[in-house]
Amino acid sequence: MQNVDKAKKEIARLEAEEDAANDSTDAARKPAQKNQAVNGSASPSTELAQEKDAAADATEDLKKASIEDNEATEA
């Protein structure tokens, strides 16, 4: 029983360290899927919305990178 309590405390400590390292944000590729054990079942519509958000973010990042590249070549 003592070992179980120690293990639970260690897991909580490690998770807290991970959250602190990630600024307490969902940095997983699919946060709904990663947090499924905590939040319950991730619905397909939620996962689809996350995928669309991720695609929009990637598109925006690529546009910014393209603009930066164009500015660097023009300078």
Image (spheres, rainbow, N blue to C red):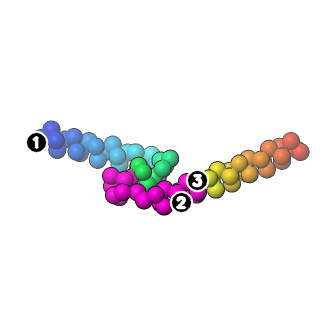
**Magenta highlight range:** 35-54
Instruction: Say what amino acid the circle numbered 3 marks.
Output: Ala
The spot of residue 42 in percent (x, y) is 40, 57
Mark 2 vs mark 3: give the one in front: 2
Residue at image location 36% in from the left, 57% down from the top = 41
Q: Secondary structure at mark 3?
A: helix
**Mark in the foreground, 1 or 2:** 2
Residue on which disc 1 sits: 1
Amino acid type assigned to the residue bearing label 1 in the image: Met
CA distance for labels 1 and 3: 43 Å
Give the structural element (helix, strand or loop) at label 1.
loop
| Quadrant of the snapshot with the N terminus | top left
Quarter occupied by the C terminus: top right
Residue shown at 55%/54% (left/top)?
51
Q: Residue furthest right?
A: 74
Q: Residues within 10 Å of mark 1 (few under 14, many from 20)?
A: few
Label the magenta part by its dominant secondary structure: helix
- Circle 2 sits in a helix, a strand or a loop, which is it? helix
Q: Is residue 57 left or right of residue 14?
A: right
Tag 3 residue: 54
Horizontal and vertical percent for residue 28? 47, 47
**3D distance between C-alphas at marks 1 and 2:** 43 Å
Circle 2 residue: 49
Would you call the spot at circle 3 few (<14 residues within 10 Å), some (14-19), or many (20 or more)? some
Cβ–Cβ under 8 Å for marks 1 and 2: no
Q: Which sits in the foreground, 17 or 7? A: 7
